[in-house]
Image (cartoon, rainbow, N blue to C red):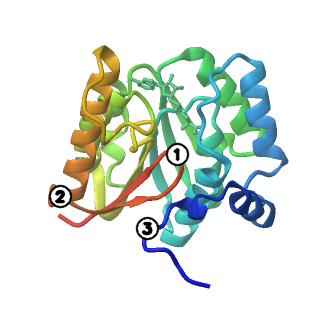
């Protein structure tokens, strides 16, 4: 049995990935309920994947994060994962543009028994982030909202994380198009912003960073500068 030189997630074998999901069971009944209720309420099904949620929880536990900012709440799925990982002393400030999404998330945090540990900030994140600036420095900034905003969110993270704190960002493979030239309109602008984000995170000096090879691409940087 050998290991191929070019390694893809699960070595490109969907059945292998299903096996891992059976063994690690990343989604419990509470998360399943949040995912299903969010869809039933008409929210887009764009929450992190079940395994990515487990990554968030386990990373939070491993790194001892207690104070996190999340940009992009949706129905609260990833927020619940982060809060579970941060434990009873954990505190999450999460930012959401759409009031309907925020209302679904509010019920999700209640359902998970975590409502007292979270504040949902409603409105465009770039305008609302100032509301938590006085509570900096943070252990984690998790970016999962409008792709065009990623470079500005990275700037904010750099200024408001403690040394050793982390930035995590989902969808940094640009929906499979990050490496492709061309594109038009909004998509081209979003891809350009995501490329800028990746390059600056990888080589900007403030972070030591890697790309966790998930389906969507989950960038992880630790603040070193
Ligand atoms: C991919 S979803 C977040 C998924 C969530 N992190 C999860 O995994 O459960 C992106 C969310 O960001 C919100 N959003 C988009 N632009 C935003 C902005 N400028 N400020 C705050 N939230 C924004 C959207 O309304 C949407 O709910």
Task: Report the front residue among 5 and 157.
Answer: 5
Mark 3 highlights which residue? 6
Nearest-to-viewer mark from 3 and 2:
3
Which of the two discs, 2 and 1, labels the residue nearer the N terminus?
Answer: 1
Residue 36, quarter of picture: top right
Residue placed at 78% from the left, 20% from the top? 40
160 relative position to 102: left or right: left
Vertical comparison of 9 with 125: above or below: below
Dot 3 falls on a residue whose secondary structure is loop
* CA separation in Å, label 2 and label 1: 28 Å
Which quadrant is the N terminus positioned in?
bottom right
Is residue 75 among the parts visible in the rendering? yes
Q: Which mark is residue 92?
A: 1
Tag in front: 2 or 1: 2
Among numbered discs 3 and 1, the one appearing first in the sequence: 3
Image position of 97 (left or right of 103): left
Q: Quadrant of residue 114?
A: top right
| Foreground pick, 94 / 77 | 77
Instruction: Count neighbours of disc 3 (C-alpha within 10 A) and say few if under 14, some if 14 to 19, many if 20 or more.
Output: few
Residue that carries the numbered disc 2 in the rendered image: 203
Q: Quick check: 160 above or below 211?
A: above
Gap in Å between the C-alphas at discs 3 and 2?
23 Å
């Amino acid at each position: 049995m050998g290991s191929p030189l070019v390694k893809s997630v699960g070595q490109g074998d969907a059945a292998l990935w299903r096996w891992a999901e059976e063994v690690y069971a990343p989604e419990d009944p509470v998360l399943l309920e949040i995912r299903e209720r969010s869809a039933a309420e008409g929210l887009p099904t764009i929450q992190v994947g079940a395994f990515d949620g487990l990554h968030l929880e386990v990373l939070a536990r491993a790194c001892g994060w207690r104070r996190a900012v999340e940009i992009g709440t949706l129905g609260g799925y990833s927020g619940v994962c982060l809060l579970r990982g941060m434990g009873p002393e954990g505190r999450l400030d999460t930012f959401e543009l759409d009031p309907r999404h925020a209302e679904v998330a509010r019920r999700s945090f209640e359902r998970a028994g975590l409502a007292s540990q979270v504040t949902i900030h409603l409105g465009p994140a770039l305008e609302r982030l100032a509301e938590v600036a006085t509570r900096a420095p943070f252990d984690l900034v998790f970016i999962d909202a409008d792709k065009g905003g990623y470079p500005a969110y990275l700037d904010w993270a750099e200024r408001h994380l403690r040394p050793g704190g982390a930035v995590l960002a989902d969808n940094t493979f640009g929906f499979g198009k990050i490496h492709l030239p061309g594109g038009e309109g909004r998509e081209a602008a979003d891809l350009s912003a995501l490329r800028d984000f990746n390059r600056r995170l990888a080589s900007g000096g403030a972070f030591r960073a890697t790309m966790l090879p998930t389906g969507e691409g989950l960038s992880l940087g630790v603040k070193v500068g």
